[in-house]
Each structure stands twice: as structure tokens, then as C-alpha cells.
Image (cartoon, rainbow, N blue to C red):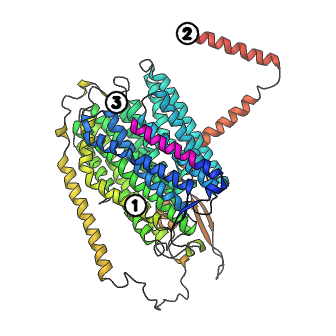
Amino acid sequence: MSLLLFALLLLVFSALLCLLLSLNERSAGLVLADFSFGSLHLPVLLALGGAVLGLLSLLPFCVTAIYRGASGSYSEFLRAWFLLPIIFVGILSALHSPAYLDAGYSCLRRGLYWFFFNLMLATMLLVTWVSQPIVFLLAWEGMGLFSFALVLFEYRHKDNLRAAWIYFLACQAGGALLMLMFLLRTQAESYPLFFFISGLLGFGLKAGLPVLHIWLPEAHPVAPAPVSALLSAGMINLGFYGILRWLLLPGLVSLPLLGYSLLICGMLGALLGIFFAIPQKNLKRLLAYSSVENMGLIACGLGYGFLSLHWQRADLALLSFAAAGLHILGHALHKGNLFLLSGNVYKSCHELSLDRLGGLQKRLPGSGCAFMLSALALSGLPPGNIFMAEILLYVAAARGIASGSLLIATLSLALFLTLAFCGALAATVFSKAGAAVFLGEPRSPAARKSHAIPALMKHCAFAFLGLSLILLCLSPFLASRLAQVFAGQSGLLWPDDLLDNFCMPAFNEHLLNTLLGFSLFFVVLLFMLFCIRRRHLPYSRREAPRRFTWDCGFAQPTARMQYTGSAFVQPLVYLFAPLLRPMRNILAPKGLFPKKASYELSCRDGGEQLFWRPLMNFTVRLAIFSHRLQSGHLHLYVLLMILGLLALFIWGFAL
């Protein structure tokens, strides 16, 4: 607890000092050092130092709690596991922020940014640490409010105001549901279903479960890139933390109900997330839908694990829980990296539309390589650490298919096909994103005028890759610790007699060591190929000379002749048109020498079209109807009061 107090004091005091000093023009303009990304002012240095030191102070606790594993408490291990993404992504996002917020922002705006950024970090730490419901709710609400202020940072744009308003409503709805859950927690024996539904919806809103994900593709594109990284890599994980920490009550919450709910929501969320990522033209919006997909896969792992407990299959449960835990850490590092890299792209050319980018590999070679490596890992391909997590879930599903039970085999086959389908589509989506941004020729004046970025922004990306490599090497150890902790919860989170033989030998560590060797072989192979290219291929270290080639009748090739991101995925969009409901805007060429021709393809969010928009329309109609009751006649108001009292009497006597 002393470590938490120290971290909170550093974060809160540095945030307040930064804001107070930013209000004074003299102190706000005091330059302490000049770097490649610009001048480092006193308020920024205080806020940055407080954020980095405060987060680093909690790292020894996390390492110790995870190393102890089952010998420590379940709550400590769970707290440390979810703190790691906040610490790593929070530090690198903080280091990325001074270069991202360049001289184009006033000292006061930068002071406000750091004030809310540090307070958001403080409330995120508090959410994982507290054990009192009231303090937890206050920290949860503070986390939503401070992150809302950061989403609203670019408030001058109308679309940003709409996105921030949607995010604010989602935060408040989640907070209200969690208040209801804690009220019902004391009477969970009387209302177990209402307790479960309110908790699942409240935490599911933060985790981005299907239909509840509506805020993710709206908030991420408008928030600053470091904030998007922290939201996607650190905050949405806390939805699963809440489920594992507060929703599991022994003997009250049915494990089959929790397992079926998470597994079905996870499969739907993973498929819908990657489906709607296909047609996206905004880079950060595409990454937001990818986060929905990955949260769905994590929910699949947890749901399948809880169902395996009910099926008396310890081997499947341990594999599934280990896969979900590794996926949380892997997604945090790689998705945080991709959001910061999207900030690099925006910083270079002030454009995020995939159809207007291109050719940035020449200007941002380091960012392009880092983007491709993180995209490769998020697609579930080796040597990424998410590959380790998904292989564990594949193995669990394959064992379930061969179990001999029709129910287990059916659900396991559905999970197996979901993993395969999401992996293939994720590779397609990230191929589109990487190629449209970094390869080919610039497709717009903004892309042609792109410039180099400060070195610190590039170093943050490579720091993420270094952490990912460390996580890859530690994956067998971390997975075994996860299995030990969950194996030791019999009698605490689920009844003692639920499993007759719930023991660690059911978890096959040999499989993890084999996967680690396979992944490290790929890492070494990639490094060797890079060295060979640098040493032996012509023009690998200097600019290639320009020479005329046979043009095959083209007088002047232009960027319009290459594929755009929309063209690359057009066949898939047409294939899934019944689900995506694409809207086409076509300006067909006319005449022998047409001057204008265009093709625009867009898709609205499925949850918005099928659920939220009809719900809002119904709410508006209901409000218009209820407005008629405000007639101004006193006798009508008295009649409504009498009817209300009669209804309360009837309800009271009926109980």
C-alpha cells in the first residue's frame, strides 16, 4: 500500500504543479533543455518525471507478485498482471507525448493535457489496487472523467465533440451499472441473475464486448495518439479485471452462465471487430476495431476456461486461462505500439486516411519496420508473443474437439474456427494498413510533403518491440505462473468439489518451451535476413540511382494507378456485404478523356445500425410522447400522482 501511495502522490502532485505552472506565462515558458523534438519546459518536465517515476515505483511489486505466483494471494497476482500494461504503456506514452505535443499547442493546453494524463494514470492504478466498493467506484468514475477530458482535447472539431459525448455516455452508463451491481452484491443470493447481468454489462462496456463497443471506434480516432495507446492497451483490460476481481462470487455466480456469456460474446466480438476493421479508411479507427477483436479473443479464453471448469477438464481450463493472460500482455504491448506509430504518421504528414497516404517508408523507415512487426504479431503469426497465446487456445480447442462429448466438441469447433477466421482476416487487415501507409507512392499532397519525426518517437516504438521480445522469452514462465494461480483457487472462486483432480500436471509446459524455441528461431532468421540485406544487396545503405525504364505506353505513371486501401479489400467487403452493408458513392468516368472519376466505399458500425440507433430513435419518440403529459393542467398532475401511489401500494402488498 505504501508503494501505491508513493506513486499516487507523485502523479497527483506533478499534475497539479504542471497545471499551476502552466497558468503562469513566465514559468510555463521556462526552457530547461533543448532536444531534437523541441524544448522541454518546466511544467512538462515535472509532469513527465512524476508519471515515469510513479509508474516505475510499482514495477518491483509487480515482478515480485508474479514471481511468487500461487504462493501469494490471488488478488495480488491479478493486480500485478493488469498493472504491467498500465506501467509499460503509460511510461512509453508519457515519453512519446512531449514530441507529439509540439510547439503548435499553447503552454496552457499542454499543461491541461499533462494534468488529465497523470490523473488518469493515478485513477487507473487505484482501480487495480483498492478493495472497497465505494473507493473502487470513485476511482472508476474518475478514470472515465479524466480520460473523457483527454478524448475532448481537440475540442474545436465537431466530430470530436460527438465522439467525446458518446464516450462520456458510455462511461456514465457503465458506472451506473456497476453501482447497481455493488448494491445487489449484498443481496446476491436473492437476485443472482440481476447481479450478474449488471456486472457483466458494466465491465463489458469498458472491455468493448459486442454492441457495447460503440465508444471504441469513436473515441480512438479523435484522441491524441499517446492517449489512444493508453486507452486501448491499459484501460479496456480493466473490464476483464473487474470481472475476475468483483464478479466471481463462490456459489452465487454460476460458472456455466459466466462461461457461456463470455465465450459467446467473445466469439461475436472477435468476428464483428475484425469484419468491421476491413473497410475502415482511418488508421486509428481500424486499430480500434482490431482492439474489439482482441478483446473478444481474450473473452473467448476466459469463457472457455470457466466452461472447462464446469466440464471437469483441468487441462482445457489451464490452457485457456494461460492463453487469455498472455494475450492481455501481448495485445497491450503491440497495440500500444501501433497507436503510437499512428501518432508518428500523423506527426509526419497530418493525415490518417489510408486512401490518402502511401510512400512513408522512405521518410519513416524505422516506424514502418516497427509497424510491420507489431502488425505481424497482432495477426497471431510467429514470432509474436500473441502467437504463443493463440496456440495455447488452439490446443485447448483441439483437445475439446477430441473429447467425445457432443456439446464440448461443438463449442470447441466453433472456437477453433473463430480463431482461424480472425487470424486470416487480421493478416489481411494489417496488410492493407501497412501497405497503404508505408508502401507505394504518396497519394496526396500531405503524404508527399511528409517529413521526418523526432528520434524519441521512433525510440518508443523500438522500446515496445524490445519489451515484446522479453515477454516472448518469458512466456513459458508466465503461463506456468498463471496456471498455478488459477489452479489454486479451488474453494475460493469455485467450490472444492467442482474438480476432483485439478492439479498442475494437467498443464503441459513442454508445449510452451517448444513454441518458444520455434519463435526464437524465427527471430534469429529475421535478424540474419536483415543483416544479409544490409551487407550484400545493392543500394541497401544508399539511395538507388534514378534511371529511365520502358514505360509500356504510360507517359507519366501516377499514384492513382496503384491500389488504395479500399481497393485492396473491396472483394472482401462485397463478400461480407450482407453484414457490413457498404455504402458506395461512385462518380463514373465519362467521355474518351474523362477528367473526374471517383469511388468511395464506407460502412457504418453494425452495433450502431442495428441496436443503438433504433434505441435512440425509440427513446426520442418516447420523450416526445411523454411531453404531451406536460399539459399545464393541475388536475392531470394530481391524477398521475394518485395513480403512482396506487401502483406503489399494489407493488408493496404484492411483495
Q: Point out which mark residue 41 bears.
A: none
Residue highlighted by disc 1: 375
Query: Separation of disc 3 and disc 1 at Cα?
Result: 35 Å
**Span highlighted in magenta in the image:** 1-17
* Residue 565 percent location from the top left of the image: 50, 66
Whether residue 108 appears in this view of the structure is yes
The residue carrying pointer 3 sits among few (fewer than 14), some (14 to 19) or many (20 or more) residues within 10 Å by Cα, namely many
Which is the main secondary structure of the residues drawn in magenta? helix
Q: Tag 2: residue type? A: Ala
Above-or-below relation of 642 to 510: above
Q: Nearer the viewer, residue 203 or 398?
A: 203
Q: Nearer the viewer, residue 415 or 392?
A: 392
Residue contact at pointers 2 and 3, CB within 8 angstroms? no
Above-or-below relation of 599 to 275: below
The residue carrying pointer 1 sits among few (fewer than 14), some (14 to 19) or many (20 or more) residues within 10 Å by Cα, namely many
Q: Nearer the viewer, residue 595 or 79?
A: 79
Q: Tag 1: residue type? A: Ala
Q: Tag 3: residue type? A: Leu
Report the label total. 3
Residue 331 shown left or right of residue 616 in the figure: left
Residue highlighted by disc 2: 654
Query: Separation of disc 2 and disc 3 at Cα?
Result: 33 Å
**Label 3 element class:** helix
Which quadrant holds the N terminus?
top left
Query: Separation of disc 1 and disc 2 at Cα?
Result: 59 Å
Residue highlighted by disc 3: 255
**Label 2 element class:** helix
Residue 598 is drawn in which quadrant?
bottom right
Residue 541 is drawn in which quadrant?
bottom left
Q: Earlier in the sequence, mark 2 or mark 3?
A: 3
